[in-house]
Amino acid sequence: MHPAYSRLLLGLCLCCSVVHAADPLRLEGLPLQLEWLDLNGDQRLDLVALLIRTQVEGTFDTSYEAGGIRGFYQEETSKEKFLATYLQNDDGFRAGPVLELGRETVFGFALEQREPARLALWRQNKLQLFDWHEDQWHAGAEQATPGFLGEQLIAGSDFQFWHKTPQGTFWLVPDINGLHILKPDQAFSTSFLAYPLISQDSVIRGGDQHQIKISLPRFADVDRDAVPEMLFENEEGAAAFTLAADDRTWTHYGKGLLADFNNDGLLDKLEVLEETDVDGLKDLKKVKSHVQILPGTGPLEFGDKPLADQWMAGWVIPQDDNGIFMPEPFLDLNRDGRLDLAGIAMRLNFWQVAKVATIGRIRIKFLLHLSQQKEDGSFQELNGSPFEFSWRLNIRKLRLPDFAQVTGDIDGNRWTDLMVQKDDHIAITPINETGIALDQTWKVKLPRAMREPDQVFARDLNNDQRDEIVVVKLGRNHTLLNTWEYGR
Amino acid sequence: MRLSQNITGMTRLIWVVTLVNATMALAATGPTQTQTIELGTEMLSPRVIWQDLNGDGRQDIWVVDQHRRAANDRMWAALADTPNQLEELRFDPFPGKIFPRYIDQQFQVCAYSQGVLWTFANGQGWHVAHDFNQTDQVRPGMGLVPLKNDWMLATARGYLILRQGCVLADLNAPPAVDISNRRMQLTYPIPQPTADPNRLASRPIAIPQAGEIRFWTAERKGEVWQAAAKSLLFPDGLQPMRHQIGDLNGDDAMDLVILAMPSKKLSLFGELSILIYLGDGQGGWETNASQQFKSKQNFWQTGPIEMDRDGLRLYYYKGILRSIFRADTYRWNEAGYIEPKPVVARWTQPDGDRGFINLDWDLNHDGRRDLLLRGEDGLQVFYRQKGDHPFDKKATRILSSKTSSNSGVSIEIGADFETTTAIQGLDQPNQLTHDKAAFIGDAEGNLWIWRLERSLNGPWLLEGERQ
């Protein structure tokens, strides 16, 4: 056999053994929200999708004019929302029940793992609960939306309104002066939390524009009791509130990013003291940030002796400078509980700006520096870092990817791997104890219908400690979803 | 992230290639009348605001020094009758928005902060005129929005209209809500006066996620304002950008024309779409557009829209290096549709200021509004013509003796829609800082062009020229 031919055969066999692709799932609408939960206890995540379907009906009219015919087209569009459930089995996904929601505003839905599985669907003026049994959603309690949101025109929402904590489940409803906190399991008993001063950074553009921005909380454990608190943050500081009605609050004034770096249950504070700047693309490797991490000594209290105080490669702090969004820099590379850090170095040159203005989209390259936190709290850059990442920017979506979106433990070695999305394939570069294994990069070739995918992310769908690659491609009034798994 | 270029995200994209610096125009021709108001010598960077303070329908002025090193304890104000009697108002510095009011035949300095309206009186200092926090609907931290002589204060459901610190009326104008990135963003329709004093209207709000456009109007019945919101369906894949309301088909019902850009695949050379919504005769419109076709203009080069029973006219600049002014007229055809192929008038306006196309003034008093453009020769008026072409390159006059313009190609996604994603602040036309010009009408309907300049011997001069 010719050596080239045998290499090709070997490659083909390797390729077949490495990746297993399911048949693409066709969702008959465009996704407003996709969530995963194991509904029937078979250790496989099932898919619940809030979808929108557009129906266009046209009327056509012709007229005789100057010896010819002119046609005029008039169209009517209607958009209807529905909630579809897809159950995963050995052969992929099969369609389950569909809940029609019509044209009304739907804030979103949340899935809750309990017995039986619960679905909380927030239609604008009410919240509806559903329980899953016998492959169907069964309607349960309903509650009217409190406060002003029930009557407002909602343009979009991605607020985490549903929270399951050891103290019970909470439904949070933002209002103009504070949050309504409802307990669905206690007959929707309600309490109200006024927004802290820290969240009151309203912006008003007088005259023609009138917008008010209110900071909403994220959830993090502040006081080491394994129960998440509501954490409001802005440029001036942070304030934390317990969800339970014991009225404990903590406030901290000062800059910095809060995260639990050393996994001790208390939030630590990351500050960037200094950064280098560079002139051109050639100097990008020289970009560095002086990072200091102060340890949490109590709820929103920080000690003076830094956990880490060092220069790190890349720009670390997420910024929204000139409209390009940078993601938060934290990720746990090897699931050891200690947070690792990512730094980014990128710059657009004049021609790239001209190109994005001219054709509306552009593929940019940036350097991704990954640093692992060692036991003493200091950070060490991985071998093989920086990794040259490539990402497609759209003039309307000038946003770098979230790290969670482009990483995942595809091969199941506990180290997260990097996924780079290209037009007709996804390149996966594994990371292991020795660092970023660029030479072991492998590809998932996308079928023709899935090329130039709209979303790619990683998720362990069958509880085998290996993340599947999930690819979503939007079509005209439908969505294709495909998954690939390593080594099956 | 360091981006040396000016590139901003969803909100707007500005790419400025400076081609030519300031140009000085030739001397003006024709009869003009001038007026000069002397401002104080000590001002570092004055800002002049025209506003009707005493409710007589004429534009009074007030002046603040906006320089960051300026003392923040002074303001100047004058009524339109006596523009030269600029009165100096002194007050203690206040951490909030300062503005004047004219009460009991005298000026008073007011401020608003955190739901409280303050006034300043000599000897007494700042004192609370009204505390709106006592009504629970008002959110602390919200500011005041001007509405003619009154102010509006945002609440959860709309606005309270305030006159002299008292609640005059309650306007129902609910905001559109967008919750993302751990922020709740409320976009309120901003009531603006219309030609009919008993009617308010806001700029439309686009809700791309729902494929809708929402209009807000209010009508006064006795002392009560009745507000209504109307929703129109908008095609997939388009995002509204500009709009105009007028009677397009001569049935006395107000029709609506919307210019829209592609919402996803956007390019510099992509053309805008025109959508026509005919009026239903009851103050609303057909829910769906009756016609939709491509215009000839790009998203970054748009301008005013005119509509009447003669058809639809779009004014804009084209070209990247040369600024070519275009007036496209779309007429009705025999089949009863707007003909998608326009009649085009075009000429090169050397160093044209692409952000400035003004059709608000009738300068030859023939009852029709003329066109103002700025370019190499300064400010030019083009008189409106009869026939197919509304304007002609030759029927022109240079108005301004001096106009400085920072000419350049400015590429900008701008929208006169309030959307939850694309926001662009517009210059308030009744404000003036130096190196710009303000266009202010007087009670007789004449156009005055005002400029702020520092004179050789010190004081700032506010110079107005009647056109």
Image (spheres, coloured by chain):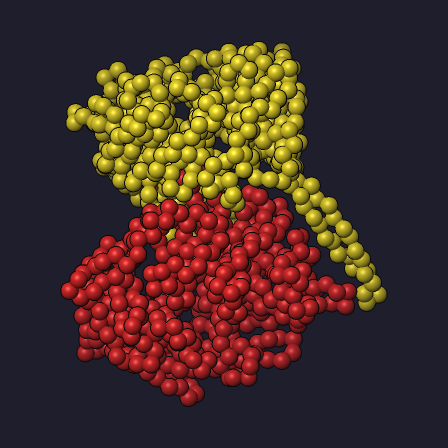
Locate the C terminus of chain B and report the quarter of the image it occupies. Answer: bottom left
Residue A172: which quarter of the image?
Answer: top left
Taking the view exactly as shown, the residue that stands out farthest to the bottom is B31
Q: What residue is drawn where x is 40% and y is 82%?
A: B466
- The answer to which of B250 and B193 lies nearer the viewer is B193
Whether residue B279 appears in this view of the structure is no
Residue B357 drawn at (x, y percent): 49, 69
Q: What residue is drawn where x is 58% and y is 48%?
A: B212
- In the rendered image of this protein, does residue A350 appear above or below residue B313? above
Taking the view exactly as shown, the residue that stands out farthest to the front is B222
Residue B287 drawn at (x, y percent): 65, 53
- The answer to which of A71 and B48 lies nearer the viewer is B48
In the image, the chain rendered in red is B
Q: Colour of chain A?
A: yellow
Q: What residue is drawn where x is 41% and y is 66%?
A: B148
Q: In this view, does A326 lie to the left or right of B303?
A: left
- The answer to which of B101 and A316 lies nearer the viewer is B101
Residue B436 drawn at (x, y percent): 35, 69
Q: What residue is drawn where x is 50% and y is 21%?
A: A112
Whether residue A42 appears in this view of the structure is yes
- In the rendered image of this protein, does residue A400 appear above or below residue B219? above
